[in-house]
Amino acid sequence: MPPFFDRVQFHDALQNQAIPVLEALVANGNLHNRSFRRFEREDPPPYASSTESEEFSDDVLAPPPPCSELPGELKAIMEQPINDDEMKDLACDMGSILDPVDFYHTEAKREESRVEEYRSNKIFGGVEGSRRCGVLVRHNVKRRWEKLGIWNPEWGFAGRNVQPNDDAYRWKWRWDQQAVDDSESAGYAEQLVARALRLRQNLRRGEKAPVLPQSCLEQDATASQAESFIISRPWFIFRIELAEERTRYDRLSVDEKRRYPHSARKQVIKWWKERGDWKEEFDRKNRVTSWKWRHESPSPEPEDLTSINNMKDSPLDTTDMDFTPSEIDDLETIELPSCDQPKGFWTIRRKDSGLRAPFPGQLLEPFQPPLPTPGSLLYVPPGSLPGRSIFEKTPSEKEHDEDSPQELEQNPPEPQRDTTSPPPQKPRRQRQRQPHRTESAQNRDQPPPLPRCSARIAGMKRPAEPLPSQATSNKKPRGRAAPKAAAPAAQPTTRETRRRKTRPVQARPPKIETETRHQRGRGRPRKENGPGTRSVVAKKKAARTPALAGPGRGGPAATGTPAGPRGRGRPRKSE
């Protein structure tokens, strides 16, 4: 009985082995009784079931050590030529290596590494420097491919995203213009790879087909000649031999691969060294990038990079590069501000960043949060919110400013009060700051304030345009107060405006006298013809209004009687 290693095998054993046996015991009574008597015996028979695996060998738990040399029977399997099914799979897998975008990307990345390793120049740093490097790399690759005769003049700048021909994924060889869409172009590449595999089908493992010397492709070459030139280049032959060796090794089983590991790359490099086709530059780059064989003319070396030493602020500083007009325009566009550059200039879209490899000079576009979709909580229909500047006032603020202009704030009207009602109690005021000495000196020449009067008289003599009140100190002096400079009768300050809003202010009678009087402090003014010093009681008696004398205290006034002093008490109301 084989061992069980997982739950799936346990489930299959119960369904296929245990349950059918139990159903047979239930259906057959004699078999059930016999089995029952067997298990009730005192000495059951010994268990004789086998526990060794019938499906797996001991090699699963302890595989043998790997061997270096393949045995003869395995080599015979690998020596067989590539059949049609394997050829079809290889053509499907390798069709992309003949696309212009694939090989241009490989060449451009290699040239970018060469520029960075040559010399670190500050003009190739940052966003603008990366774009300058992309233009320089494209210039060098273009000149090399023009010498080989494979450059298409209709190609633009791969990764620039300004013109339609900048899309390298739509590039086509100049002899492959009959393809309309991408599917036809991919089918053309697969047919070209299948053609190269059929030419090598009768070759033995590790054998090389003879190649006619051809250093470059002529401009008037036909499509067949151009295809023969492409599939006979060293970089293409190396990748074909590498794919064939891997396909042959995949014919072996899993146990055979585990026992005899094999590196297809090392084997192909060994064959190339034996034939004399391997170069030292291939060892440094670990890949074959040559376009010409040894028996052909020397391969066009990459462009000279010594002119980079003459570049200070821009690649245009040197005259040895021979930039084309389109390359000069692109370098000048890089120097412009980002707002003046085309949209998507040398950027790769975020949705394509995981599908397409960036070209030299291409950077990921800036992140922009997605707009809310209709129906979401953050969605706002276009035009529903009025556009307003940061410092612009809202409609409510404008309406508030119209209702309360600055003039009304500076000169607010005083509230009207009934003259017959008793004067309201003055609220306690806070102590005010004393005016500056310089202000006091300037106000000494101003006219003195008018005399005070009671609330009743002030209400009867209220002018049409009230005069502003003067700020006074918090303490009330007793007796005679020293002269003090008064504030100028000018426009009231903001603090005085707020004070008038909180408490009623007694208005002063209009100015009658034009004479200049000596300025005094708080208190009632003294009489002009009276003595210089008067008591407070005398001032209060003088402020009272004389009434007509009557026959008695509190009696009616006598007619024709001259006015005389009255007794004590409140003055009689005027009728």
Image (cartoon, rainbow, N blue to C red):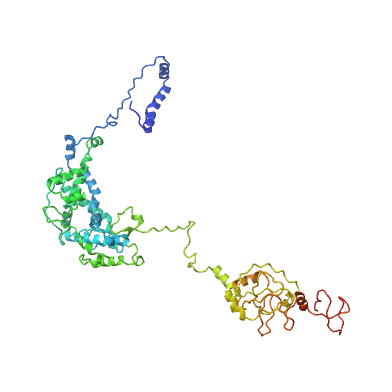
Residue at horizontal 18 percent and vertical 45 percent from the top:
268
Q: Give the quarter of the image for residue 415.
A: bottom right
Q: Position of residue 366 (x, y in %)?
A: 37, 59
Q: Is residue 362 visible?
A: yes
State left or right for residue 428 relative to residue 236. Answer: right
Residue at horizontal 29 percent and vertical 67 percent from the top:
332
Which residue is at the front of the view, 230 or 294? 294
Where's the C terminus, which quadrant? bottom right
Q: Position of residue 201 (x, y in %)?
A: 16, 45
Q: Position of residue 548 (x, y in %)?
A: 83, 81
Residue at horizontal 68 percent and vertical 84 percent from the top:
513
Where's the N terminus, which quadrant? top left
State left or right for residue 519 relative to residue 155. Answer: right
Which residue is at the front of the view, 494 or 365? 494
Which residue is at the front of the view, 492 or 154? 492
Q: Residue furthest top?
A: 42
Q: Position of residue 259 (x, y in %)?
A: 23, 35
Q: Is residue 195 visible?
A: no
